[in-house]
Image: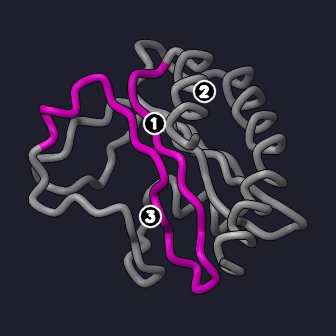
Amino acid sequence: MYGEVLQIILNAMRSPCGMFASMNEAGDRVIHATICDSPDKCETEEKSGYFPHRSRNYALWARCGKEKKSFASDGPFDIPEGHIPIIRAMAVAIIHREEVIGNLTVSNKSTDYTDSDMKLLETIADHIAPILYARMKAQQAG
């Protein structure tokens, strides 16, 4: 499901790459879906879908979660060696009842991300929030 939702988002955002993640109770980032038009170009040594809270740095996704704000940037980006180059990116927090429960990140659109792009991604995140929250609670209970 996460991958299908992310693909729809990427089509709407005209972005070739993106990520759909949630935050667990400890504040760690758990990647549910990653899509990129050229995954074979990724040569990072460690490909993990889990980023402990302590590993946060000034990445866009970390800032949007910490500050509960959306961010767009043309870089430069602190990415691991061998990672697919990120030219531009936008990250939006998924917030449920004032708590950040995840984020959506899109990247490498051929043109700059606009205010209307940000509003669209924020609206999508608002609609996803209660569904993601319910899925997270069901997983914790099961």
Q: Position of residue 62 (x, y in %)?
A: 52, 63
Residue at image location 51% in from the left, 76% down from the top: 28
Q: Label 3, on which residue?
A: 58
Magenta region, residue range: 15-42
* Comes first in the chain, label 2 or label 3: 2
Is 35 inside the magenta-drawn segment?
yes
Q: Where on the picture, by quarter, is residue 75?
A: top left
Give amino acid for label 3: Tyr
Give amino acid for label 2: Ile
Between residue 63 and residue 38, name the one nearer to us: 38
Residue at image location 67% in from the left, 46% down from the top: 70
Horizontal placement of 14 versus 83: left or right? right
Label 1 crowd (10 A; few <14 / some 14-19 / many >=20): many
Between residue 87 and residue 132, name the one nearer to us: 132
Q: Where on the picture, by quarter, is residue 36?
A: top left
Q: Determine the CA span between mark 1 and mark 2.
A: 9 Å
Label 1–label 2 contact, CB within 8 A = yes
Label 3 crowd (10 A; few <14 / some 14-19 / many >=20): few
Q: Position of residue 104 (x, y in %)?
A: 59, 45
